[in-house]
Amino acid sequence: MTLRQVAAIEKREMREQVQKLLQEAAERVVREIDPSQLERFKAVQVTSAKQAEHGDFASSAALTLSGPLKLSARDLAERIRSAIQDPDGVLERTEIAGPGFINFFLAHSGWHDLLVRILRERERFGWAVPGSGERTQVEFVSANPTGPLTIGHGRNAVLGDAIARLLEAAGHEVTREYYFNDAGRQMRVLADSLRARYAQRLGREAELPEDGYQGEYLVDIARELVQEHGDAWLDADWSRFKKAAEDAIFADIRRTLEKLEIHFDVYSNEHTLYSEGRVDATLADLRAVGLVYEEDGAVWLRSRDLGLERDRVLVKSSGEPTYLLPDVAYHREKYSRGFQRVIDVLGPDHIEQFPYVRAALAALGHPADDVEVVVYQWVNLRRGAKLVKMSTREGSFVTVDEVLDEVGGDVFRFFMLERRADTHFDFDVDLAKDRSERNPVFKIQYAHARLCSIERMALERGLEMPALEEVRFARLESPQELDLIKRLERYPGTLLHAAQAREPQEVARYLLDLATAFHTYVSDAKRHRVLSEDQELTLARLALVTAVRITLANGLDRLGIQAPERM
């Protein structure tokens, strides 16, 4: 491997190298046939081949572009193939398949160069250049302080944090934000519920409100109030109970998030929107553009004029705003902070309202397309064959803390992330507690620990990695070794696509696939003994082992999961 090749592999990924060779060849051919068609050939693409016999990469460019040149796709493919110039020896060979596909087979040295790149970039492998993305806000969790975080909230928390981590790897400047409703009727109901529990604790007769919160957590808060204040609050204003409940519950929420190592840059609340006049200003601006009318004592948004199926109430006849009005005001406030992209992670109960928020923003002159929503579905908790019934208001729910105490944060995170956010799933506690390969996160973490163990044994034997230019990567020639390296090549693309699609499960599946391939590789100890008497081969395999470990650790970190060195 030459220093020139090392420099080339550091500048661009292998897929980009092949794409550049293809692009240059296609342009040479078009200039010969019809230079006026050159613009059509500015975006030829290569993709990973789906089957090993079709090479490493493939392109259908000739099929889609042959018409304007009045050639058959196969003839155009052959002419492009013949025009490929590969001075660095990136390709082993190319083939034409079917009606005009071009298949690319990389030289083994190209795959070995990938290992050099990983070993040089280490924890930055797969990351875009910092600042190359947008200034992005991710709002997630945003649970109101009416009770502890349930496992549904836990899915929101883990999903939002993973999306933020992926966006950071894709070059975005990310702000994590937690927004909560601390105004309105639900907080009055919470206050009245705590007042009743407080009175009961003092031996007074008191009933919960008809739709009050029944959870045991309010009994605990009431006990603390009695210990601190005695009966001095019996005639206190409801706002005292609201603040006491909000402070205690929110402190509990923060402790839960700390357990998951989730941290926010900004906390914002609905009350501030009112106190700063943002809600009133939003209503006035909607009036000014003719999108507000009054009927039956309520204030309505003319959302049908915005292309939606019905008008929506902004302010009830009682004078209390609905959730829609402060939500619009809140998103306007986000724009005022200069975010280029706003991502809301929301539960399914918000699906119906979000289009109205977006339409109102657009009507007020804001770039509504820069606001997107990631909707996740609720989670069922399963213990054995039994599903657990949950309801926050009725007090029959399982908290995130309870599940974390049983299965740990890493398993909790992985289970919440391994499926698409918009699918329902049952969180299987029994499987989560299993410490065998049936548990996918255990399998991945165990692979990382095995890799660390191999590196430790090498150090104990006095083996140190020489300069990368001195490692004989050509000794990595078995099909299993090349397969592992090819799987490593897919990591940067997987990371980027997962960030763009807001789908962390792609990274979770990739890590499980890579870990499985590694376990298979080392299980054949006779053929793939890493530490052997052949020092040249040992060093090459140590480089491969280190590259796999780096990639597993990087991927786990993007999901917020630990990469243990021992298990």
Image (tube, rainbow, N blue to C red):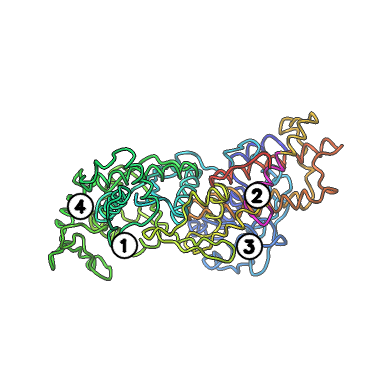
155 relative position to 267: left or right: right
Which one is closest to the eye, mark 3 or mark 2? Answer: 2
Picture quadrant of residue 193: bottom left
Q: Which residue is mark 4?
A: 282
Which one is closest to the eye, mark 1 or mark 4? Answer: 1
**Magenta segment includes 373:** no
Q: Quadrant of the C terminus?
A: top right
Where does the image place residue 445, in percent across and percent down from the top left?
65, 46
Where does the image place residue 175, in percent across and percent down from the top left?
40, 42
Q: Quadrant of the N terminus?
A: top right
Mark 4–mark 3 Cα distance, whole angstroms, equals 58 Å
Q: Which residue is mark 1?
A: 353
Report the amino acid beneath label 2.
Ile
| Tag 3–tag 1 contact (CB < 8 Å) | no
Front-most of residues 328 and 474? 328
Label 4 environment density (alpha carbons within 10 Å; few <14, some 14–19, many ≥20)? many
| Tag 4–tag 3 contact (CB < 8 Å) | no
Mark 1–mark 2 Cα distance, whole angstroms, equals 39 Å
Where does the image place residue 505, in percent across and percent down from the top left?
54, 55
Q: Which residue is mark 3?
A: 77
